[in-house]
Image (cartoon, helix red, strand yellow):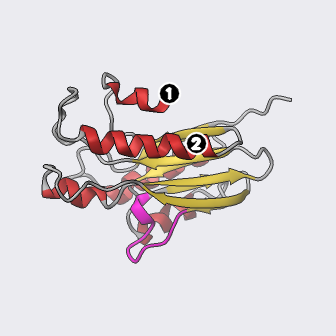
Amino acid sequence: MTTRLTVATLNTRGLPLKGTRISERFAAIAAELNSSDVDVVCLQEVFDHYHLRLLRSRMPSFPHVAHRQSPAGPRDGLVTLSRQPFSDTAYTRLPQPSRHSNLPARACLNALHSGMLTVRLTDSCVSVLNVHPTANTDGDWSEHNRFRQLQSTQLAALADLVDADNSPSVVCGDFNVARISTLHQTLHQ
């Protein structure tokens, strides 16, 4: 028996953030997704309670919502909404830079907001992983860039989580890794 599952993923803030009308952006995203035929939506960078409430109120066809709570809003900005019920949810923090990394202080701070949110859909037993690793703000995708070790470690943690789960999995999110990067090979090993 083949089960069809349509999943959408979106970094809700994207670039540029400065000068955008973020509440209007969230309202437009919610309206578009609510009228779509998508089954599960994985969102990144939903950092506060206000925008989560806005999304939920404008997406009534997605009654099932998963996120981990933090004082400001969804932990690490990860939210998964579904038309199908969840039987389980889990949050996993991604590895952090070492104390001896040569990453910029801002990148180390941003790494604190790197994680994975996993939901298991009740009816199909499919796991949907919503991931948001640390961004390479240098834009250097060479083998020797200063973000490579951290991103490699974070993607390896994602691969380990998928390997440990015996159910079919859908992995999506904002990977923050360019298509040309060889880091994607980490996910195929």
The residues colored magenta run: 67-77
Q: Is residue 178 above or below residue 48?
A: above
Question: Relative to 109, is 187 on the left or the right?
Answer: right
The residue lying furthest to the right in this view is 1
Q: Who's the residue at 22% across and 29% down the image?
A: 141
Is 128 rendered above or below residue 79? above
Q: Nearer the viewer, residue 167 or 43?
A: 167
Q: Residues within 10 Å of mark 1 (few under 14, many from 20)?
A: few
Residue 21, image x and y in percent? 29, 55
Which residue type does callout 1 highlight? His
Pinpoint residue 11: horizontal percent, then vertical percent: 40, 46
Front-lying residue, 14 or 148: 148
**Which disc number belongs to residue 188?**
1
* Label disc, if present, on residue 162 of the rendered structure: 2
Front-most of residues 51 and 90: 90
Q: Is 163 situated above or below 13?
A: above
Q: Is residue 33 left or right of residue 126?
A: left
Q: Amino acid at mark 2?
A: Val
Can residue 84 be spotted in the picture? yes
Magenta-drawn stretch contains 70: yes
